Each structure stands twice: as structure tokens, then as C-alpha cells.
């Protein structure tokens, strides 16, 4: 009873359903218009060549059928001596000319489609990459955004072109069907309708299960990413040692197989139902074609049609069925491709963050003040940071201390304008940072993250990417390398020009510490007034750590330095230490002050110091 009240009286469409269908139709039409615009702008010349050649070729089947009919009729009459050899050669010449024209049009069509597809793939890929470049860092930490990105990128090569080509094929199918249908209509009143009707069941089945296939793939997007990740763990050159040592490749393979089995079960069910319905559709089509053939044979027995007319029927059956199939499949194909295009547009419609919006920041950053700053991720109800306040000035070093998950890295993302605070204010030189464009503020900051980048490029690029417009600054790169203690690059086969990593041929793999030194060089390469070190010595040995700390001390003279480290030998050099717990500042002060308070910092320091004490 409740369901009936919600849905309305039997036989009366639900207002809500009608509205949703209308909105869905408008969206599909909007997506179709956007897709055609996208295709046309990708390459107008090749698009026009494809359309013209395709539509011209659509009239050839009827012309070939009619010329073939005339030729067969003339051959039949020639047996009675009523037709000259020249007349037969003329019809044969026309038939050959039509074949040549068809080959020319097919060549133009295929070439223009291939070039249009390449231009379109470049255009769409560029839009996806531009969109990805404009998304906020928060968006990349959202699994749903990753799903949308994967769905959009997976279909970039085929779906936009598929919409355009199927729409052109739809118009061509109409031309072919009308022209061939006009020839077949002369054979009898019911012949053409029966042949047309025989084409419908297979198309209905194809359309129905095509949509179901799309929905199945859509449901599997997340699980497919997990399965691909598990596969990458089993084939990773960097993880193979740990996987082998701990012997959990069997566990990874079992999980990978479990995801496959889940996909397989859904696929088997889909294939079985599609096969059963497809068989039923084929039987129905065969019966209808058989009925149409019986009608034609009755007329042939009565002498009402010629040999040429019969050839039109025999050849026209395949032509009409193929054309009707193309026509109806074209409609369903466009619909299905638009479903996939919605994935692309959903991704492109995600809100972007304009890093150049706001006033340009000029000059060095002299002071940074966090005033009651809080942050929580969108669509969550947990504060990662709450009421965080501190001030650091030029020439000072500030260290952030706390257990994992305390909010240290989030605070750095706020400082560097990768995130915007949910509450409170960040002041730069006493001015609200939100007034200024993130990009201009970030130019005054240089950072090494704990999960620093290991770029599969040359050693030079790994350093100079901090300011990509200075890639040829040889002196600057060398100075940053020496500052970071990365002199090992001189021993590489091609020095700074040596490609790094194993991803590409000729690459030289580095140790974790060497990669970290290059990341430090990247930090030093940018002439910034704020330096941020997120676990800067995590991958370094004791000697390298000591050298790095000395270099950090030298950097704090005329800049603002922010440190995150679990090593108190690094933290001690800071003028001010902020202790975070659960996103809240629980202590702040110098090393000496915090040790005197005997609070959490002192407890953590002494806990670590005991690890270096000689056993009693």
C-alpha cells in the first residue's frame, strides 16, 4: 500500500520519474552536443572529410543493387539475342566504376577517421590532464575522484570518436535504407516490412545487454583499481624484495584472484542471459525472413518478377538487415557511448582550484602566524587540526613534533597553500594569506616532503624541476647539489644528464638516501624565503644526517625554516618547538623550556635518548 501511494495510481506515470527522465534526456542531449563540438574542434578538416565520404558511400549499395539487377536482366535477355555485347559491357563498366568509387570513398573515410581519432585523443587527453593539474590536492586524496579520473582516462581513445562516427553512420544508414528499401518495395507490399521486422529482435537484445555491460563495468571500477594495485605489487621492482622476504605473494595473488572471481561471476551471468536472448532473437529473425522468401517465391512462380528483381531481394535482405542493425545499434551505441562520456564530463565538471586567483604576493615572507587555525576534510565530521596558533619569524626555525596522525603534514599543507583552512586565519607578514594567489605565495616556499618525488628523469631535472624555467642554470644546479651533499651525481655515467630510475632504458637506480639528497637539492635550488623539511633525514645514514643538520643550521640565518622530524637530534636546532597531539597544540617553546616543563616533549625526548644510552 505504501509503495502504491508513493508511486501514484496504476497506469499514471510518477511525476518524480517523469522529471528525472526529462532531466536525464536533457543531460544526454547536452552531452551529445558537447561531444560533437569536441570532435569538430579537434580537427574540422578531417571531420568534414569523414562526414562527406561516409554519406556519399551510403548511396552506393542501392546503386550497386540496381545496376546488378539491370545486368542480370540483360544477360537473361541476351540468351534470346535481344541484347548487344556493347550494352552488357556498358553496364559492367558502370558496375566497376561504382566499385572503384566505393574504394576511393572507403580510403578517404578510413584515413580521415584515423587522423580525426588521433587529434581527438590528443585533445581529450589534454583536457583531462589540464583538469587534473587544476584540481586541489584534497581532490587527489579522495577515492571517488580517482575513480572518475580512471573512468575518464580509460575511455579517452574511443568513446568521443564513437559518438561522432555512429551519428554519421546513423545518417548513412537512413540514406542506405531509404534507397535500398525503395528498390525492395517494388517486390511486394509485405516483403520490406517483414525484412525490417526481422532485424529488430537482435538489435533489442544487443542494446539491452550493452547497457547492462556498461553498468557492470561502472560497478566494478573501484574493485578493478584494487585488483590492478594488487597486480602491481606482485610485479614491482622496488617491492619484490619485501614481498619475497615476508613471503606474502600468495596472499596478494589470492586477493587478486578473488577480485577476478567476482568479476567472472558477473560476466558469466551476463553472457548466459545475453546468449539465451540472442538465440531467441536469431530464431525469430529466421522465421520472418523465411516468410518473406515464401512470398517472393510465390510471385516468382507466377512470373511476376524477373531474375534481376530476385537478385535485389536476395542481396537486399542482407543489406537491409545490416542497415537496420546499424541504424538501431547506432542509436543504442550513441546512447551507450554517451553514458561513458558522462564519466568524462563528470570528471571535467569537478570544481577546480585556480592557483593564480587573488593578489600576487611580492617580496620575501618575514613572518608566518597561525591564528586559531582548524581543518577538516570535506564530507567528514572529524577535525584534523583545531585552534592551532603559533608565530615564526625570519631567521627562526620552528619544529613540529608529534606522533603519526597528529596533524603535522596537514599543517604543512596549510602553510604551503595546498589546503585552505576550515577555520581560523593564516597571516603572512601580518596579512591574510587567503588574499593572495596560492601560486605566488608558493614561489616563496620550498619543501622536501617525507614522500618526496623520485622522478624518472635526468639528475639535472630532478633538481631543477623546483623552478622549471631554470633547467639550464648549470651553476644553480651545481650549487644546490653541493649544498645537499649530493656529490655522487658526478660519478654517474653522464653526470647530471644521467637518466634515473628503472622505468626507462638506460636509467640508473639510486639508493633511498641518494634520492633524498636529490630531493634536498631540489629544495635548495629554489631561492625561497621559507624552507620546509618534512623528515629530511629519514633515509640518510648517521654521517649524512649530521652533514644535513649542519646544512640546515646554515640555512636558518635569513629564512623561515619549518621542520618535521621524529629525530630529536634534528628537532633540537629549532628556536621554537610545537608539540601536536590529536590535531591540537599541547606544548610550545624552545628545547630547553620544554625539557624544563617535564611534559610530553621531554618524555618523548628521553624515550628516544634511552635508545642511545649504553646498556647498564
Image (spheres, rainbow, N blue to C red):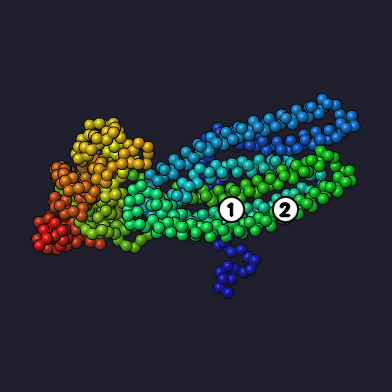
- For label 2, the residue is 285
Query: Does 593 sit above or below residue 454?
Result: below
Q: Residue at x 17, y 48 (%)?
A: 542
Q: How many marks?
A: 2
Helix, strand or loop at mark 1: helix
The quarter of the rendered structure image containing the N terminus is: bottom right
Query: Does 447 sit above or below residue 142?
Result: above
Helix, strand or loop at mark 2: helix
Give the quarter of the image for residue 279.
bottom right
Q: Residue at x 71, y 29 (%)?
A: 97
Q: Residue 105: x and y, percent?
A: 64, 32
Q: Which mark is residue 210?
A: 1
Q: Are there few (<14), some (14-19), or many (20+) residues within 10 Å of tag 2?
A: many
- Nearer-the-camera pick, 192 or 365: 192
Earlier along the polypeptide chain: callout 1 or callout 2? 1
Query: Does 133 sit above or below residue 506?
Result: below
State the separation of the CA atoms marked 1 and 2: 20 Å
Q: Residue 207: x and y, percent?
A: 62, 53
- Nearer-the-camera pick, 513 or 17: 513
Give the quarter of the image for residue 547.
top left
Q: Is residue 172 visible?
A: yes
Q: Residue furthest bottom?
A: 1
Q: Residue 510: x and y, percent?
A: 28, 42
Q: Is residue 52 left or right of residue 258?
A: right
- Nearer-the-camera pick, 317 or 196: 317
Q: Residue at x 37, y 57 (%)?
A: 248
Q: Residue at x 35, y 41 (%)?
A: 502
Amino acid at each position: 500500500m505504501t509503495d502504491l501511494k508513493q508511486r501514484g495510481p496504476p497506469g499514471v506515470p510518477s511525476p518524480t520519474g517523469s522529471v528525472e527522465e526529462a532531466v536525464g534526456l536533457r543531460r544526454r542531449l547536452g552531452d551529445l552536443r558537447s561531444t560533437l563540438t569536441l570532435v569538430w574542434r579537434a580537427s574540422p578538416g578531417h571531420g568534414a572529410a569523414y562526414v562527406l565520404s561516409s554519406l556519399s558511400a551510403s548511396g552506393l549499395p542501392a546503386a550497386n543493387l540496381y545496376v546488378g539487377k539491370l545486368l542480370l536482366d540483360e544477360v537473361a535477355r541476351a540468351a534470346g539475342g535481344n541484347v548487344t555485347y556493347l550494352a552488357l559491357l556498358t553496364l559492367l563498366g558502370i558496375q566497376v566504376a561504382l566499385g572503384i568509387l566505393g574504394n576511393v570513398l572507403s580510403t578517404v573515410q578510413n584515413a580521415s577517421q584515423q587522423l580525426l581519432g588521433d587529434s581527438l585523443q590528443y585533445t581529450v587527453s589534454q583536457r583531462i590532464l589540464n583538469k587534473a593539474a587544476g584540481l586541489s590536492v584534497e581532490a587527489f586524496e579522495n577515492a571517488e575522484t580517482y575513480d572518475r579520473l580512471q573512468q575518464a582516462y580509460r575511455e579517452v581513445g574511443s568513446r568521443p570518436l564513437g559518438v561522432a562516427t555512429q551519428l554519421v553512420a546513423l545518417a548513412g544508414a537512413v540514406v542506405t535504407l531509404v534507397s535500398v528499401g525503395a528498390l525492395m518495395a517494388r517486390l511486394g507490399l509485405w516483403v520490406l516490412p517483414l525484412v525490417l521486422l526481422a532485424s529488430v529482435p537482435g538489435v533489442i537484445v544487443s542494446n539491452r545487454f550493452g547497457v547492462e555491460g556498461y553498468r557492470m563495468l561502472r560497478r566494478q571500477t573501484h574493485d578493478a583499481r584494487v585488483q590492478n594495485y594488487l597486480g602491481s605489487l606482485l610485479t614491482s621492482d622496488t617491492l619484490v624484495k619485501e614481498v619475497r622476504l615476508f613471503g606474502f605473494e600468495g596472499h596478494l595473488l589470492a586477493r587478486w584472484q578473488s577480485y577476478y572471481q567476482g568479476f567472472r561471476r558477473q560476466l558469466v551471468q551476463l553472457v548466459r542471459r545475453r546468449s539465451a536472448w540472442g538465440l531467441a532473437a536469431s530464431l525469430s529473425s529466421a522465421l520472418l525472413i523465411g516468410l518473406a522468401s515464401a512470398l517472393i517465391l510465390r510471385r516468382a512462380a507466377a512470373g511476376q518478377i524477373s531474375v534481376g528483381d530476385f537478385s535485389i531481394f536476395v542481396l537486399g535482405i542482407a543489406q537491409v538487415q545490416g542497415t537496420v542493425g546499424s541504424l538501431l545499434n547506432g542509436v543504442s551505441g550513441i546512447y551507450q557511448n554517451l553514458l561513458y562520456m558522462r564519466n568524462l564530463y563528470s570528471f571535467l565538471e569537478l570544481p577546480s582550484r585556480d592557483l593564480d586567483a587573488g593578489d600576487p604576493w611580492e617580496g620575501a615572507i618575514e613572518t608566518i602566524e597561525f591564528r586559531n587555525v582548524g581543518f577538516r576534510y570535506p564530507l567528514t565530521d572529524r577535525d584534523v587540526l583545531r585552534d592551532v596558533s603559533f608565530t615564526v619569524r625570519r631567521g627562526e626555525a620552528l619544529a613540529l613534533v608529534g606522533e603519526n596522525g597528529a596533524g603535522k603534514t596537514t599543517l604543512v599543507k596549510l602553510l604551503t597553500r595546498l589546503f585552505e583552512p576550515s577555520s581560523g586565519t593564516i597571516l603572512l607578514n601580518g596579512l591574510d594569506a587567503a588574499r593572495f594567489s596560492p601560486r605566488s605565495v608558493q614561489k616563496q616556499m620550498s619543501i622536501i616532503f617525507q614522500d618526496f618525488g623520485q622522478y624518472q628523469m635526468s639528475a639535472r631535472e630532478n633538481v631543477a624541476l623546483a623552478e622549471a624555467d631554470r633547467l639550464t642554470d648549470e651553476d644553480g644546479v651545481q650549487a644546490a647539489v653541493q649544498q645537499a651533499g649530493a656529490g655522487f651525481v658526478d660519478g654517474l655515467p653522464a653526470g647530471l644528464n644521467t637518466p634515473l630510475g628503472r622505468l626507462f632504458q638506460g636509467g640508473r637506480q639510486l639508493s633511498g638516501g641518494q634520492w633524498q639528497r636529490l630531493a634536498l637539492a631540489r629544495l635548495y635550488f629554489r631561492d625561497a624565503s621559507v624552507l620546509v623539511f618534512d623528515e629530511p633525514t629519514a633515509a640518510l645514514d648517521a654521517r649524512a644526517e649530521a652533514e644535513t643538520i649542519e646544512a640546515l643550521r646554515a640555512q636558518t640565518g635569513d629564512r623561515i625554516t619549518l621542520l618535521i622530524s621524529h629525530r630529536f637530534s634534528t628537532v633540537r636546532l629549532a628556536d621554537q618547538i610545537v608539540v601536536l597531539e590529536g590535531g591540537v597544540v599541547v606544548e610550545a617553546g624552545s628545547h630547553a623550556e620544554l625539557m624544563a616543563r617535564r611534559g610530553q616533549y621531554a618524555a618523548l625526548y628521553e624515550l628516544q635518548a634511552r635508545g642511545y644510552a649504553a646498556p647498564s
